[in-house]
Every structure is written in C-alpha cells, then in structure tokens.
Image (cartoon, helix red, strand yellow):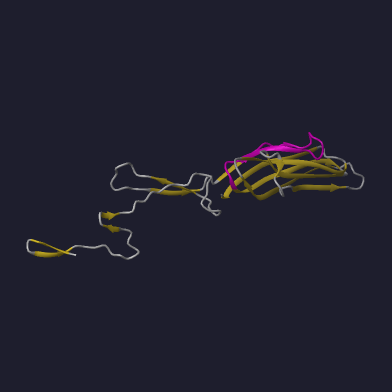
C-alpha cells in the first residue's frame, strides 16, 4: 500500500506474515499479545520431576518499564534435629524407645532421611545383647519400612565368666520416604537380650536425624 504527502510517495509498512511474528494486523488495528506470569504454590507440581518452587514477583501497576522478577527455590531444602540419649535398660527387652531426635517433613513429597547414633552396652560375662535402631512415622503410628538396623551386637562367653565389659559402637541408617502431607518422623532405639546375662547398662546415644527434600 502506498500513500502520498506533499507530492511525495511513501510506503506504508506491513507486518511480516511469518509464523514467528507474534503481532497481528487486523482491519481495526494492531493486536499485541499480552503475557501473564504466575508462580507455582509451594507443595504443588507441574510434573513429577519438579523439586523446586517458582516465585514470580509482578511489577507495580502502571510501572514503566514493567520489570518481572522470577526465582526458584527448594522448599524446604533440609532439616535436622538432635536428641538426648535414650536409656534402653530401663524398659523390657524388645521395647522401642524414642531418642528425642525428631523432625517434621513439612509438606508432600519425597525425602532422603539419614540418622546417626552410637550405642553403649555394659554387662558381666557371659552375655549376649543387641541394640537396634529404626525410624518411626509418628503420623501413621507405624515404623518406616525397611529402616530397622542392628547398631551393635555382643555375644561374650569367656571361660569362667564374671568379667565386666563396656562396649560402644557407631551406627547410621539412610532411606527415602514419600509422604502425602506434613509428617513427623523420629529415631528410636531398642535393647534385645539374646541370651546368657542381660546387660546392666544399654543406651542409644548422640542421636541425629536429618532430611532433604528431593522431589514433589
């Protein structure tokens, strides 16, 4: 299309009809596509592999230029708790005792859980005693499957007996757990009298329990 002004002829620009042009020329004027950015609420997902939340901060109304701020974050990244030593001798053999190392997984998702502790057994020979540890789901009232670990085992039968022995050992456990909402997990310990004399002291000490969210 051409027009004239003051005896001159000028070309009226037209939009490139190529598919990469986002603008549209219509009989009533030029259409410019509008873009609206929204974030994803914590704990929701757009796909099974997402492990971060996307935050979008919109510009103030009427600002020029319009500046949008977009960021991403793990929600939350990690958490950790330490507990007091658990006296396993004060209860019957086979009884699970909470250590006080307890965390709250804050939202739905998959978490890597890790726990560390050390055990102590004091007994007079001959004795056979084990100390075990596990994770317990407080929300459901059930053990976390596959997390029971033997931290220490002693089977001492010296000739004549009567020897007082104090032994310690370090242990750890790791697992992945998927939850559907906020979930409380704790570390527990257990003394198991296997045979001969029972222990006179048994504890699960220095307990630590931590988590890292790895997926929604």
Residue that lies at the very extreme toward the left in this rendered image: 7
Which residue is at the front of the view, 65 or 47? 47
Which residue is at the front of the view, 120 or 52? 52
Q: Is residue 3 left or right of residue 118?
A: left
- Residue 41 falls inside the magenta stretch: no
Q: Is residue 180 left or right of residue 158?
A: left
Residue that lies at the very extreme toward the front in this rendered image: 27
Q: In this view, does 63 lie to the left or right of 36?
A: left
- Residue 89 falls inside the magenta stretch: yes
Q: Which residue is drawn at 74% across and 37% down?
A: 97
**Quarter holding the N terminus?**
bottom left
Which residue is at the front of the view, 39 or 145? 39
Residue 93 pos. (x, y %): 82, 39
The answer to whether residue 50 is above or below residue 205 is below
Q: In this view, does 189 lie to the left or right of 1?
A: right
Residue that lies at the very extreme toward the top in this rendered image: 90
Residue 133 pos. (x, y %): 73, 44
Residue 193 pos. (x, y %): 84, 42
Q: Which residue is drawn at 26% across and 62% down?
A: 15
Which residue is at the front of the view, 210 or 75? 75
Rendered image quadrant of residue 209 = top right
Question: What span is in magenta?
Answer: 81-109
The answer to whether residue 121 is above or below residue 11 is above
Count numbered badges in the picture.
Answer: 0
Residue 47 pos. (x, y %): 53, 53
């Amino acid at each position: 299309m051409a027009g004239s002004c003051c005896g001159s002829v000028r070309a009226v620009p037209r939009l490139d009809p190529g598919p990469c042009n986002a603008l549209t020329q219509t009989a009533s004027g030029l259409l410019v596509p509008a873009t609206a950015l929204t974030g994803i609420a914590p704990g929701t997902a757009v796909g099974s592999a997402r492990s971060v939340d996307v935050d979008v901060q919109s510009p103030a109304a009427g600002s020029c230029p319009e500046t949008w701020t977009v960021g991403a974050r793990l929600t939350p990244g990690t958490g950790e708790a330490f507990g007091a030593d658990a006296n396993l001798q004060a209860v019957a053999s086979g009884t699970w005792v909470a250590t006080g190392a307890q965390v709250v997984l804050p939202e739905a998702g998959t978490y890597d859980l890790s726990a560390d502790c050390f055990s102590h057994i004091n007994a007079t020979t001959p004795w056979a005693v084990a100390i075990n540890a596990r994770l317990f789901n407080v929300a459901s009232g059930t053990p976390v499957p596959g997390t029971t670990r033997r931290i220490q085992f002693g089977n001492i039968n010296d000739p004549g007996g009567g020897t007082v022995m104090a032994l310690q050992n370090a242990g750890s456990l790791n697992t992945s757990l998927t939850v559907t909402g906020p979930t409380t997990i704790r570390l527990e310990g257990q003394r198991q009298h296997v045979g001969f004399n029972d222990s006179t002291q048994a504890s699960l000490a220095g307990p630590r329990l931590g988590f890292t969210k790895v997926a929604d």
